Amino acid sequence: MTHTIDREGTRLVLRVTGRLDVQTTPELEDALKGQLDGITDLVVDLTSVDYVSSMGLRLLLALQKRMFKQGSMRVTNVGESVMELFGATGFDEILTIE
C-alpha cells in the first residue's frame, strides 16, 4: 500500500493505492496523525484500492466519526469489489461515497 496526502487549506485529499489490511492500515494511521487538525473537508480517494479488511473498515469509520465532528468526509472512486464490501457491511449507508 502506498498513499499520498495533499493539503490545501482546510481540505485534505488522501489517495490510497493497494490494500488496506492488517499490515498496511497501521502505517496509514501513523501517517495521518496530526494531519487532520484544522481540516474541514476530507476526501479519501480509493481509485487504486482493491481490498479493504476489517482493520481498513475500522480506520474509515474512525475517520468518518472524527470528520463528522469537525467537517465532512467523502470517499471517492470506489472500485467494484470494494463497493460490494461496503454494501455487504452497511458502510455504503455510513460513508458518503461519490
Image: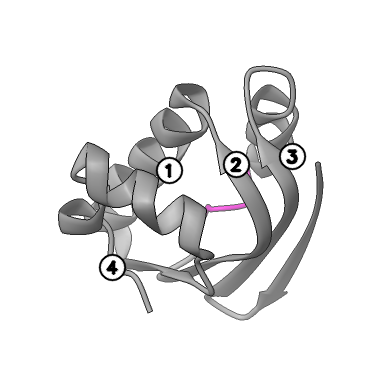
Q: Find disc 4 in the rendering and name its residue.
A: 96
Q: Which residues are magenta?
A: 34-38
Q: Which residue is mark 2?
A: 51
Q: Secondary structure at mark 2?
A: strand
Q: CA distance from mark 2 to mark 1?
A: 13 Å
Residue type marked 4: Thr
**Which residue type carries mark 2?**
Tyr
Image quadrant containing the N terminus: top right
- Residue 35 lies, in percent from the top left, at 64, 51
State the residue lying farthest toward the top. 22
Residue at image point 60% right, 41% down? 51
Q: Nearer the viewer, mark 3 or mark 4?
A: 4
Report if the CB atoms under discs 4 and 1 are less than 8 Å apart. no
Give SS at disc 4. loop
Q: Residues within 10 Å of mark 3 (few under 14, many from 20)?
A: few
Callout 1, which amino acid?
A: Leu
Residue identified by numbered label 1? 60
